[in-house]
Amino acid sequence: MKTIGVLTSGGDAPGMNAAIRAVVRTACQSGLNVFGIKRGYDGLINNDMQMMDLRSVSDIIDRGGTILFSARSEEFRTQAGIQKAIDVCRMRGIEGLVVIGGDGSFRGAKELSEQAGDIRFIGIPGTIDNDIPCCDYTIGYDTCMNTIMEMVDRIRDTSESHGRCFVVEAMGRYAGHLALNAGISVGATCILVPEVPYDFEEDVIKRLKRFLATGKQHFIIMVAEGVWHVNGSDPKGSCTQMAKEIERLTGIESRAVILGHVQRGGSPTVRDRVIASRMGYMAVNLLMQGQGNRIVAMQNEKLLHFDMHEAAKMTKGLDRELYDVAHIISI
């Protein structure tokens, strides 16, 4: 193998730049050519890339986002789009791809690799949602949890000052990992996640009233965004509606806060920088060993790698013990 490419796809996540840096420097030190592909698969289709060297990735390890940019490509979902990407790879001499992103990004790379036959890919899990089934941990997850914690700590200050209840929505798509862990870290009164069904009257209203009776005067309700999809028929299907219902039923002045895309940005934590660097290093070495269609994963604090088909069959649930802990101690 002489030439590889690296791209970021899907939603950005803090630590992606650290992974890019590790891929580029490992490749260069190993005598490989490495192209940085701009804007994910869209850049691959349109031949929007540049040759990278050691200095191309200087001073980026502390930066959020991705220097290669990210975009979703509708054209790449078609056979014609995949063929265009294959043609560009062959024109550029790219024999291996390192794809930093989520499940959708990996599926696209797998189709390209299988259709081409001679182009291998390695996936690096980069998503704040931590929802890749074969991984305990994905790049960006730790930074995002810390960002949520910092933002909600500030919200709690004003909640305490005014004796209010704040309903705070965290990202996570259909996974509740962010909301659960960040909720515990900020002492949320209630934590609602899509993996655990809830009864609004029993699990929110009665709980708030019970704590009001003990003298508690301010509250944080942490909600994972996926809850609204799971409970789509619930009339309280938004932060705003839930806050209104809480105020109506309890008399507690209530506000809604959607943290939104602030959760995606910011300088990555030590954990995200180190794990991203290790994953980038492993990805290049796997390609050099002739391996392909594999996903780099962290399980039980160890870096492993799985065949894409094997990884696709895996499932990942919420830590129910941690959820039970949250329910008991958040009083």
Image (cartoon, grey):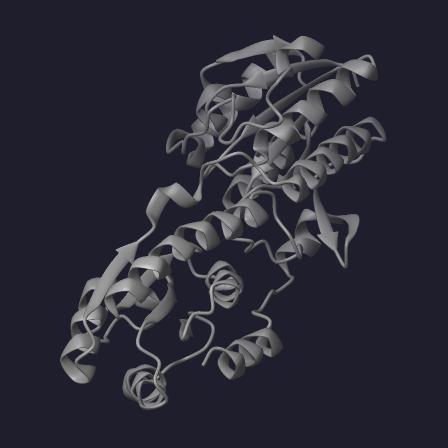
The image position of residue 107, as x and y in percent, is 55, 43
Q: Nearer the viewer, residue 16 or 111?
A: 16
Residue at 50% in and 34% down: 9
Picture quarter with the N terminus: top right
Residue at 40% x, 34% y is 72
Residue 207: image quadrant is: bottom left
Please indicate, yes or no, whether residue 181 appears anywhere in the rendered image: yes
The reply to whether residue 53 is visible in this rendering is no
In front of the other: 327 or 287? 327
Image quarter hosting the C terminus: bottom left
Towards the viewer: 56 or 74? 56
Q: Is residue 87 left or right of residue 42?
A: right
Residue 60, quarter of the rendered image? top right
Q: Nearer the viewer, residue 94 or 317?
A: 317
Residue in the image at 65% along x and 31% along y? 19
Residue 325 higher or lower than 291, as above or below = below
Q: Position of residue 76 (x, y in %)?
A: 44, 31
